[in-house]
Amino acid sequence: MEPKDVVSDIEVYTDKESQTVDIFHSQVSENTCLQISDKPFPVDRRKTPAYSRLLAISNIYGYMVAGTCKGLSVFMTADAQNELAQGKSKGTNTLVSLAAHKEVDLGAYGQVSHIGLTADELQVVVATCTGKLVVLSSASLLDKNASGLGKDIKVIDLSTEIRDVRTNPQEMPSLVAVLTLSGDVQIVDISSSSVKCIAAASDQITTSICWSRKGKQIICGDSSALLKQRVPTDGTVKRTIKPQSDDDNIQPDFAVLAVDWIDTYTFFALYGPFPDGALVPNNGGGGTGAKGVDDGVDDNMTAAYVITKSGKAAQTQQWIYIEDPCSSMVCPTRYPGFHIACLPDWGKSASNVVLMAGTGSDATMTIGQAIMSDMADGADADFEWAQWDIDGAMAVMPRSAVKSSDSSDTFPIGLAIDYTATRDLPPVTDDGNR
């Protein structure tokens, strides 16, 4: 699907409303679930934390790592693609079993909460709910003849509950940024096992983190709705981004719930209330903090922005408002978890695409930077950010094929982009032109 074909029809809103364009998502196999484990995750936030990030993909070596209730499931991406493509569900919620996968038991270290890959994709970094980082060799995990975890395992005990883990994407591959539940930012060197706090919660509670694309700096969103660009070696703040003073969408009690560093001068940030229960240990990272009750946060209106400027010398910073980003109304008890994945340099007519999913939402959102015209050559055209309206062709969570007395709703616990796929997508119009 050529990017220029999906941005030709534009509906523009004014007065802080989002611009929207059309894009169509196509399911590999409609309502087909790929089974990689014998036990599903509970929806209960205290059993499957809202901050969980349980999917990582290697586009260098073509493998995937997914979290399970017992540990990890490791498999080749091509095997998953083939099994999904062959699924013949036709809306019947077929459960397709992935035979070619390896299950890894990490129960001795606690329940898995986060999964990431080092920059060279030769190591898998796993965080557990008991505050441990477990570093594993991907070669050992992929070896079908090897039993256990292999001899290259390393365990770093941080002795604190972990809200987020981000492996460095390029420049400093041994560094891992860890956001603790209490709001500290720690930089862990998995080669030396050294740990250094670069932003203390006693100064300001950090609520979200993300490396720059090259991994030279890290952006930290906090409970005061500030974005602080920090040096990972000592935490020096190089830049602070404050919400616009006249912005009615960002309320006084809003924090930065999620952030993605798209390019040097562009960020995607999501703002919303940071619930009291998010700081309570063993509470799953959200809710009011009340125990033994349904403690979902009902009034969870959020606001998202693309924050950008044209270059270092530019005096004006542009804030592009994104309306209603993945509301948690379907499952408010799983607020405020979000997953963001960026697809850079998609094509000559669409330079960046951002995909987002909310842990309490059954739908996704697509935001893109595209040429807002029918121009064949984008050389002299301006790229503009907009929400891509995909009503009717939205990427949604499949209905659960696992029988449950509660609901067949499913919610995301990870998001990743596969660059290895070679399968052609079907046309989105009957004439086959798009």
Image: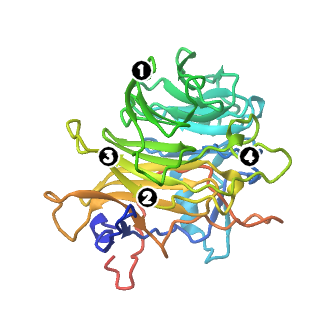
User: Distance between the Cα atoms at labels 1 and 4?
Assistant: 33 Å
Q: Earlier in the sequence, mark 3 or mark 1?
A: 1
The reply to whether residue 249 is visible in this rendering is: yes
Task: Locate residue 410: give its quadrant.
Answer: bottom right
Q: Residue at x 36, y 33 (%)?
A: 214
In the picture of the structure, the residue carrying the numbered disc 4 is 288
Q: Amino acid at mark 3?
A: Thr
- Mark 2 element type: strand
Residue 413 image point, x, y percent: 62, 50
Label 3, label 4: how many angstroms apart (C-alpha)? Answer: 34 Å
- Disc 1 secondary structure class: loop
Of 130 and 203, the residue lying toward us: 203
Quadrant of the rendered structure where residue 425 is?
Answer: bottom left
Q: Earlier in the sequence, mark 2 or mark 3?
A: 3
Tell me how far mark 3 sits from mark 1, CA to CA. Answer: 22 Å
The residue that mark 3 highlights is: 308
Mark before the other along the chain sequence, 1 or 2: 1
Label 2, on which residue?
Answer: 322
Residue carrying label 1:
236
Residue 73: quarter of image: top right
